[in-house]
Amino acid sequence: MNTNQNRNKAILLMVFAAVLWSTGGLFVKLIPWHPLAIYGGRAVIANIVVFSYMLYDHRKPKPKEKQQPFLTLNLHTFLGGLAYSSLSLFYISATKFTTAANAIVLQFTAPIWIILFSLLFLKKKPRKEDLIAVLFVMIGISIFFVDGIETGHIFGNMLGVCSGISLATMVLITKHKNTKKPIEITLIGNTISTIVGIGFIFPQQFNSTIILSILFLGIFQIGLSFIFYSMAIPHLTSLDAVFIPVLEPLLNPVWVFLLTGEKIGSIAVLGAIIVLLTIMIHNYREAKLAT
């Protein structure tokens, strides 16, 4: 399979992951639990899915030169897992202390942090095209959520920025040459999330809706989505790995519209169009460079 075919498949897998991530808001609302209980509960279920996938992949026949340990535990993979785990924790906490719009917009400052960290630690200068793409994505997503963005909420906004830093860090570690199997970072990250959140689960109430919702979050919204993500990211640039997931917050009001009939405002549509066009143009340029 040539580079462009690998890239096209990776983009499709990343879009699938973003679609699954976007369902989180709907199912989280069905679970009247403490946020950290949801954080830990879905991680437990997700790790069963991820561990099963890793076991299946490890047992597949491979040439000797492609055989790898089932799990590599070192500082590199631990830091990746910590970034993965803290991303969700910071975002959940940010939504408690600021508006959901602020939390989302600040989380998707991640492309800015990727450019900055790449310059500082990898000595990689950003291309003009990348800087323009980041600017337009930030403008688009800000327009999309303009009605919900508020000033103040300093602590919550700081947590939102931290979630953006965590996302950028996770992507850069996952893309690093020392990361042989990106799925390992997911397993380690979910393990950390389980340790942090497991104690909050036991006092919570349970019923069939709650159980089904937490199973969906663990199996599909986190487990399967990050399997797709880990398969896609080796074939995408670091910026693409945060540009394409921007589809996640854009899809949230679509699910609300389909289920409740609540219409999306024209300003939000304009913001979505700017984001989608920017992502499409950026991916087209990357594909041309790959040929």
Image (cartoon, rainbow, N blue to C red):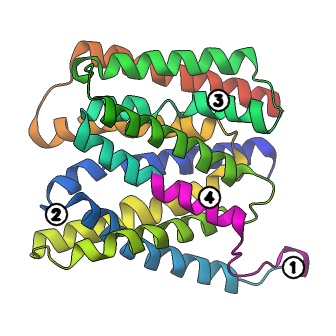
Residue 247 in the magenta stretch? The answer is no
Which quadrant of the view contains residue 98? top left
Q: What residue range appears in magenta? A: 64-86
Q: Earlier in the sequence, mark 1 or mark 2?
A: 2
| 127 left or right, relative to 199 | right
Q: Which mark is residue 33?
A: 2
What label does residue 80 carry, if any?
4
Residue wearing tag 3: 283
Q: Is residue 250 visible?
A: no
Q: Amino acid at mark 3?
A: Asn
Return the residue found at the far right: 65
Distance between the alpha carbons at the discs numbered 1 and 3: 33 Å
Secondary-structure class at tag 4: helix
Residue 285 percent across, percent down from the top left:
71, 23
- Residue 25: x and y, percent? 25, 48
- Mark 2 is on which residue type? Trp
